[in-house]
Image (cartoon, rainbow, N blue to C red):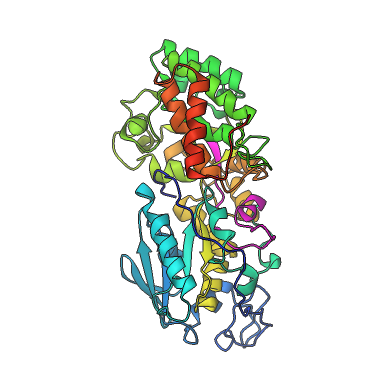
Amino acid sequence: MRKFKRVMALTLVTAMAAASFVGCSKSSSSSSAGANNNTTKEAVTDASGKEVSLRDQIAAKKYDSEGKVLNIYVWNTEFIDRVKAHFPGYQEVDATNGKIGNVDVKFTLVENKDNKYQTNLDQTLQDNGDNQENADADKKIDIFLVEADYALKYVNSKYTTKLADLGITDADLPNQYQYTKDAVTDSEGNLKGISWQGCPGLLIYRRDVAKDVLGTDDPTEVQKSVADWDKFADTAKKMAEKKYVMTSSVNDTYRVFSNNVTSKWVDENNVINVDDNIKKWVDMSKAMVDAKQTDTCELWSDDWAKGFYKDGNVFCYFGPAWLIDFSMHCDEKGSVGYDGGWAVTEGPQGFFWGGTWICAAAGTDNKELVKDLMLCLTTDEETMTQIVEKDHDFVNNSKVMEAKATDSSFGDKYLSNQNPVGLFCNGIKTVSLANISGYDQGCNEEFQNAMKDYFDGNYKTYEEALDAFYDKVIIKYPDLKKPE
């Protein structure tokens, strides 16, 4: 999954009154996949009695009974690539246009930078959603993508469709990881999005640096030196003695801490709350910055990425599978990964980072195709195995991933053919969204900004930085209050 720097989301005008739709019911078995216009997870057989796969059912369809255009909003090419490579019957016209059956597929790509994606999406959803009778059906959004940091903003609005209203039920999702459902479940318990990915994270370290400082690059042995935050801090001191930095930035560890909080950013009285685990991150990061064991550069900056290359001096990063294969420049000569120079181990705590969820826009006139696309890319085992093997994504299917974890022939060339799937499978078991809220993106970003100023010496004390954080958050969310 290719990621770009996240920025603060604008507030979407929302209403909890959900639009009602006619659901696509599951069809029963048919003697001919071509004659059956509804895909189903139940057994479908052809004239000879042979079971027809979901992919073959989809490939046989023309999609000629609904809308003529399927409009999909994305912030990068990742989902476009998945559809092109893995959805049966997709025919590419150009980089952002294609056809599925008789339907034209149009991808609108608006980059995340400076909040452009959400700003554009919000305006278009509002225009379409508030003017249903006047909106051009061929221009209305049918599908849009969201990330975990701001998913609740959309699922708790009238602009997303319940999956149940598309005909997708719990019976279709037996192997999906629970947190991927929790991220897109609205306040009334309705599932309003779906993902093909799981994004558990691991500690990603340089093999040559591990050998130089720790005497081994074996993941099991390296884990002993990073098994908790005290050991992590001790190892950072050893790295510094040999002129390495432990991480490229304090921001590399932030998400690990923020994923393991025991309370929400905002309490039931709308008072801003800084969890004890977040404060632990501040204390550790301040000590490491002062000792020159890490830096304060921004994620996705050129300075942060210097450690991706052999002439860098960074021991480790934290991230999921997509970070390794799509963001660490491993296909470039001179990079650490080009010759298989990275390895992974569990690290101090389990966490997740990112993920892309598919949402059906309210008012879509392509319910059948939207449903089929969701089922194919996020539930079909054949398709999801293809995605693992071809794209090295960690897919949202426990059965597929557990099988791949024990596949001795599977490995990642950027990790010297280490098979990381078993470690990722262990890590995803600890992921919980029990403490997420609609304020997370803004609070996380403003807290990191304020603490960067503290680490860089622009604030003399943590308390000064904390006050600045409160002020910035309340500007963004006027309904919130400082703690007394």
At 58% from the left and 65% from the top, the residue drawn is 380
Q: Position of residue 53 (x, y in %)?
A: 59, 74
Q: Of residues 197 and 455, which is closer to you in this image?
A: 455
Q: Nearer the viewer, residue 108 or 271?
A: 271
Measured along the vertical axis of the image, is residue 397 above or below residue 228? below
Query: What residue appears at the point 55 percent right and 14 percent down from the top-left corner?
Result: 234
**Up-down: is 88 above or below 473?**
below
Q: Is residue 350 magenta?
A: no
Q: Which residue sits at x=53%, y=63%?
A: 359
Q: Which residues are magenta?
A: 178-203
Quadrant assignment, res 382: bottom right
Is 374 left or right of 74, judged from the image as shown? right
Is the magenta region chiefly helix, strand or loop?
loop
Q: Nearer the viewer, residue 469 or 145?
A: 469
Residue lying farthest to the top in this orientation: 241
Q: Position of residue 338 (x, y in %)?
A: 35, 38
- How many marks on residues? 0
Question: Is residue 181 on the magenta stretch?
Answer: yes
Give the answer, above or below, for where 445 lies relative to 129: above
- For the C terminus, the quadrant is top right
Q: Nearer the viewer, residue 345 or 5?
A: 5
**Location of residue 230 in the rendering, given as x and y in whole percent from the top left corner:** 60, 18
In the image, residue 340 lies at what x, y percent?
41, 35
Whether residue 204 is visible here, answered yes or no, is no
Does any portion of residue 54 appear in the rendered image? yes
**Which residue is at a point 59% across and 59% down the rendered structure image?**
156
